[in-house]
Image: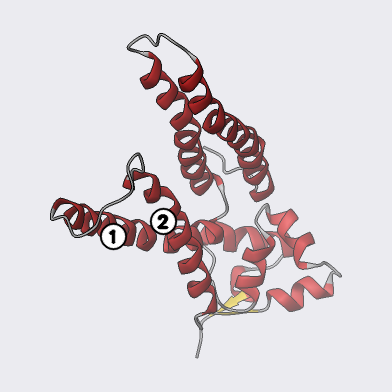
Amino acid sequence: MKNTLKELRKDRGWSQGDLADQLSVSRQSVNAIETGRYDPSLPLAFKIARLFGCGIEDVFQEDD
Amino acid sequence: MEQISYKQAQRRYIRIFWPVMAVYIVTCFAGPTLIGFVEPQPMWFKPVIAILTATPVAIVFWLLLRNVRETDEYVRSQMVSAILPAAAITLALTTLWGFMEMYGVVTLPERVSAMFFVSPTFFALWSIIHCINNARPQ
């Protein structure tokens, strides 16, 4: 899946570590999601969307 | 059960891991020293020394299992992706070694047990497979 996590994070001036702390996950997880190496579980995807105050489809999109 | 944070999981692991490893190192040296020093030795003495020496290692494996449960989902998937093949290869290698010993193909020096190599083999394979998994394009 594609995602806009990196852009959303940078818009808020957060580092990967900052975002990881807010999501209670590791920095490696944030990096893996941003680079497309890992698709988060539904609970984590919803947590991410809620953190950024947007819908889950605004953060994650299917690959074409 | 609410999932704890990644950092809390790591702290819980490290907090017990290092003291347990310190105890293990002490018992590794203290055990043979006591065995050489204490005379006469009751029947339970050597088994108790062996159990006290092995217990920290058992605790580390328990810590590992707990960390796999408590860590975040991505790190858990990375760990499991390396631990399972490492365990499979270790079991295959130790089974092979067992048959080779049984048929007299290989021998170890006296007082050196092949069982001592099982854990180091597993942890070494885990590390290697983890590196290979990370190096592979996803």
Residue on which the image places disc 1? B93
- Which element carries disc 2, helix, strand or loop? helix
Q: Quadrant of residue B29?
A: top right
Q: Is residue A60 above or below residue B106?
A: below
The amino acid marked with disc number 2 is: Thr
- Label 1 marks a residue whose chain is B
Instruction: Determine whether, in the image, residue B33 is placed left or right of residue B82.
Output: right
- Label 2 marks a residue whose chain is B
Residue A4, image x and y in percent?
Answer: 68, 78
Circle 1 residues within 10 Å: few <14, some 14–19, many ≥20: few
In 3D space, how far apart are the residues under numbered discs 1 and 2 (Cα atoms)?
A: 9 Å
Q: Is residue A62 above or below residue A19?
A: below
Depth check: give the residue in front, B91 or A18.
Answer: B91
Residue on which the image places disc 2? B121
Q: Residue at x 39, y 45 (%)?
A: B116
Residue with the most extreme right position: A13
Depth check: give the residue in front, B59 or B10.
Answer: B59
The amino acid marked with disc number 1 is: Leu
